């Protein structure tokens, strides 16, 4: 009998480092990386602003090494928007200077991806080195 295996994404460096206990409930918004992400030539500016352990991480472009991009683990992101330069009312903040990070409504993201995100991370910190691909 065939068994179903959940596809996972391995998190590679550079990645964000920080707290592991910040997400106490499902945030109202999440960070998504759009097609403008260049990976900052391997030195991503954004990861330094993320206060959550292994929330932002490197995904290599297998077809065009050594290029790659940054992705966000949507099961650990707290929606703080520290990684984006777009603040409320057009305010300019620190964070990605290339317009490659957008904050999106969680419910809309879940609907669009047919995924229900966990309210708090659903695996122990020792397993944060990977993420189910549905949460990326
Ligand atoms: S999201 Fe922005 S800051 Fe982060 S790697 Fe991509 S382009 Fe660079
Ligand atoms: S919104 Fe906050 S927690 Fe989420 S990826 Fe950006 S900096 Fe990290």
Image: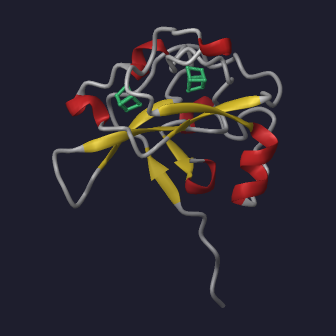
Q: Which residue is the extreme one toward the front?
A: 90
Color theme of the render: secondary structure
Left or right: 44 with respect to 114? Answer: left
Q: Residue at x 55, y 55 (%)?
A: 133
Question: Which residue is at the front of the view, 127 or 56?
Answer: 56
Q: Residue at x 38, y 20 (%)?
A: 97
Where residue 95 sits: x, y (%)?
Answer: 45, 15
Left or right: 96 with respect to 104? Answer: left
Q: Residue at x 56, y 47 (%)?
A: 136
When the figure is inspected, residue 127 is found, relative to residue 47, above or below; the finding is below
Left or right: 35 with respect to 108? Answer: left
Image quarter of the N terminus: bottom right
Q: What is the number of callouts on the image?
A: 0
When the figure is inspected, residue 38 is found, relative to residue 19, above or below; the finding is below
**Quadrant of the image where one finds ligand 2:** top right
Where residue 62 sits: x, y (%)?
Answer: 25, 57
Q: Residue at x 60, y 30 (%)?
A: 125
Where residue 72 sits: x, y (%)?
Answer: 53, 36
Where residue 18 sits: x, y (%)?
Answer: 52, 14
Q: Which residue is the extreme one toward the bottom?
A: 1
When the figure is inspected, residue 96 is found, relative to residue 5, above or below; the finding is above
Question: Which residue is at the front of the view, 54 or 110?
Answer: 110
Examine the image and state in which quarter residue 134 appears.
bottom right
């Amino acid at each position: 009998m065939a068994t179903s295996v959940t596809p996972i994404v391995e998190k590679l460096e550079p990645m964000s480092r920080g707290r592991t206990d910040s997400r106490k409930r499902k945030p109202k918004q999440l960070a998504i990386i759009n097609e403008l992400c260049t990976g900052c030539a391997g030195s991503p500016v954004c990861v330094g602003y993320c206060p959550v352990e292994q929330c932002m991480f490197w995904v290599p472009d297998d077809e065009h090494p050594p290029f790659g991009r940054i992705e966000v683990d949507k099961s650990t992101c707290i929606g703080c928007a520290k990684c984006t330069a777009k603040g409320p009312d057009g305010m300019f903040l620190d964070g990605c200077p290339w317009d490659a990070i957008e904050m999106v409504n969680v419910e809309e993201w879940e609907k669009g991806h047919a995924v229900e995100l966990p309210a708090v991370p659903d695996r122990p910190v020792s397993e944060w080195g990977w993420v189910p691909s549905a949460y990326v």
